[in-house]
């Protein structure tokens, strides 16, 4: 692993672990090479926003000394990693992209971070997020904007946008992301890497901001999971993050032959750009050619619009609950008696802000009904393929108000918040979902290639199936700026 970012691209985390364990490369050498890539690439990207070089090198020297002493090595021994700035890291500035926490230095790391460091990973810095991870970009008043490594004029996605850009360019061996509306999956799709939104509850969220630092509650719906350069890395990392293999069933998927695959594309629920639809259709056709049974019509037995409205109302309630009372009251006072067939995001936000405990409990009961429908669906199908987003990475927004933004999907304006529509089904049902880069590309306005991914959803607790199929379908390609 040479020090120059223009020489051999860093191996995935699994291969790098093996090289370190075999003594082919020292931990200090691995950390130094990663710091060199950050020095070369990060000024143009602004993905890594806090960097602790001396601390990282000191930890690397301790690791090399420990290895020289003999004994078994932990599974992530010596891996240099960055961590999404939403997660607290002990003794390291952890801002959540919010001016209110610009100087926050926690004494204790988030639980998920502790699991990674106990497994041998070395945290070298933090990556950029929108304030409180509440956007599909990575831009905030503390650190500014992160660019996509495939084209600086477009976003890397959010909220784990800095994380995805760092992994895609080799500035981190892997990353830890969080997802309540697509924040792992959308950046993975936009930056051409692998990402896993695990089964809900599998990875601890204590130490994530929000909620406020020191608050031991965790947001309903939210999950934490890994971003990486290979499917096998996801498998390695979810084993560590979940606390051991006993928490996950082994993969049943080994090849496409005999696999039952449903494909969900545009059916009125959410628009899908032609490039995305064609790319996922090509993947599905490839699986069919290798012996899979593929259906473009199979769906879980619920109304997708109703499911999304229920999810979005709950999400807006969670987001609004910590707002100042007067701000929440103003949102709740908006008109939320909109068209029930497809309520606007303004209306859904107002409903969420106005919810009391009884109303929230009613939504939870409806949520359980959707989960049962998903469970029934996955008795008949092994996996569902669908978009991670309706388009490739889009230009950096200029409109400051989230709900006033729109996206251009094949020339048609689409509400910006509709990005959540393809994230919502798996998240609301609590199932695992991976995103895999599929070796197909769109073209940006500047003529750059933009990677495309596919979202793979499997049944509750079948995280390893989602990862296994991602490994069959996907392959990582470094962006030209970093190769």
Image: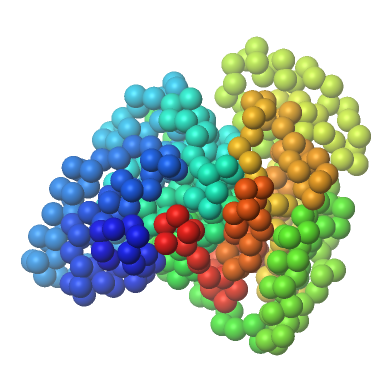
Q: Quadrant of residue 87?
A: top left
Against 318, residue 366 (above or below) is below
Q: Quadrant of the N terminus?
A: bottom left
Residue 392 position, x and y percent, is: 66, 52
Residue 335 visible in the shown view = yes
Q: Is residue 252 above or below residue 394?
A: below
Residue extending farthest top: 326
Q: Is residue 309 visible?
A: no
Left or right relative to 354: residue 106: left
Q: Position of residue 308 (x, y in %)?
A: 77, 45
Q: Nearer the viewer, residue 27 or 196?
A: 27
For the point 90% across and 37% down, the residue is 340
Is 340 in front, or is 99?
99
Estimate the x, y position of residue 231 in percent, counting from the top left: 49, 68
Identify the residue at horizontal 47%, vertical 62% (top origin). 478
Position of 418 compared to 432: left or right?
right
> Which quarter of the figure is the C terminus placed in?
bottom left
Viewer-nearest residue: 217 or 190: 190
Q: Residue at coordinates 32% horizontally, 43% vertically from top-left?
A: 125
Q: Residue 285 falls in which quadrant of the image?
A: bottom right
- Identify the residue at horizontal 84%, vertical 22% (top origin): 335
Residue at the farthest front position: 447
- Is 209 situated left or right of 260 in this image? left
Q: Nearer the viewer, residue 88 or 146?
A: 146
356 in relation to 170, above or below? above
Residue 54, image x, y percentages: 18, 42
Task: Name the image quarter holding residue 316.
Answer: top right
């Amino acid at each position: 692993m040479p020090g120059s970012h223009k020489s051999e691209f860093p191996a995935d985390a699994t291969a790098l672990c093996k090289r370190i364990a075999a003594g082919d490369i020292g931990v200090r050498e691995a950390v130094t090479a990663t710091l060199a890539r950050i020095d070369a690439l990060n000024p143009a990207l602004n993905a890594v926003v806090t960097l602790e070089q001396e601390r990282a090198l000191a930890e690397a020297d301790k690791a090399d000394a420990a290895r020289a002493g003999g004994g078994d090595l932990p599974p992530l021994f010596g891996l240099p990693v960055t961590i999404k700035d939403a997660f607290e890291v002990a003794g390291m500035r952890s801002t959540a992209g919010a001016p209110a926490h610009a100087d926050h230095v926690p004494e204790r790391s988030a639980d998920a971070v502790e699991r990674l460091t106990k497994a041998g990973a070395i945290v070298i810095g933090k990556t950029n997020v929108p304030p409180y991870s509440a956007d599909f970009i990575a831009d905030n008043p503390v650190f500014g904007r992160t660019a996509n490594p495939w084209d600086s004029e477009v976003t890397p996605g959010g909220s784990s946008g800095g994380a995805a850009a760092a992994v895609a360019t080799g500035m981190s061996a892997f990353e830890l992301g969080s997802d309540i509306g697509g924040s792992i999956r959308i950046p993975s799709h936009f930056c051409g890497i692998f990402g896993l939104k695990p089964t809900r509850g599998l990875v601890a969220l204590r130490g994530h901001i929000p909620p406020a630092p020191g608050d031991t509650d965790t947001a309903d719906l939210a999950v934490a999971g890994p971003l990486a350069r290979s499917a096998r890395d996801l498998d390695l990392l979810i084993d560590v993050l979940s606390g051991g293999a006993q928490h996950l069933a082994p993969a049943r998927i080994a090849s496409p032959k005999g696999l039952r695959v449903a494909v969900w594309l545009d059916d009125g629920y959410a628009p899908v750009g032609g490039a995305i639809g064609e790319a996922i259709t090509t993947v599905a056709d490839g699986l069919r050619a290798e012996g899979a049974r593929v259906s473009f019509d199979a769906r879980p037995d619920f109304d997708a619009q109703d499911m999304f409205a229920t999810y979005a109302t709950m999400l807006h309630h969670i987001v609004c609950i910590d707002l100042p009372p007067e701000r929440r009251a103003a949102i709740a006072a908006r008109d939320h008696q909109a068209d029930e067939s497809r309520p606007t995001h303004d209306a859904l936000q107002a409903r969420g802000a106005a919810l009391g405990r009884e109303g929230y409990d009613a939504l939870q009961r409806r949520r359980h009904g959707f989960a049962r429908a998903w469970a029934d669906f996955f008795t008949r199908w092994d996996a569902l393929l669908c978009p991670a987003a309706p388009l490739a990475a889009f230009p950096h927004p200029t409109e400051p108000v989230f709900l006033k933004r729109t996206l251009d999907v094949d020339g048609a304006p689409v509400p910006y918040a509709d990005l959540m529509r393809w994230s919502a089904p798996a998240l609301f049902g609590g199932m695992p979902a991976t995103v895999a880069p599929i070796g197909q590309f769109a073209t940006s306005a500047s003529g750059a290639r933009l990677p495309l991914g596919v979202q793979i959803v499997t049944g509750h607790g079948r995280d390893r199936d989602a990862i296994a199929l991602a490994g069959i379908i996907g392959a990582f390609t470094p962006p030209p700026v970093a190769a």
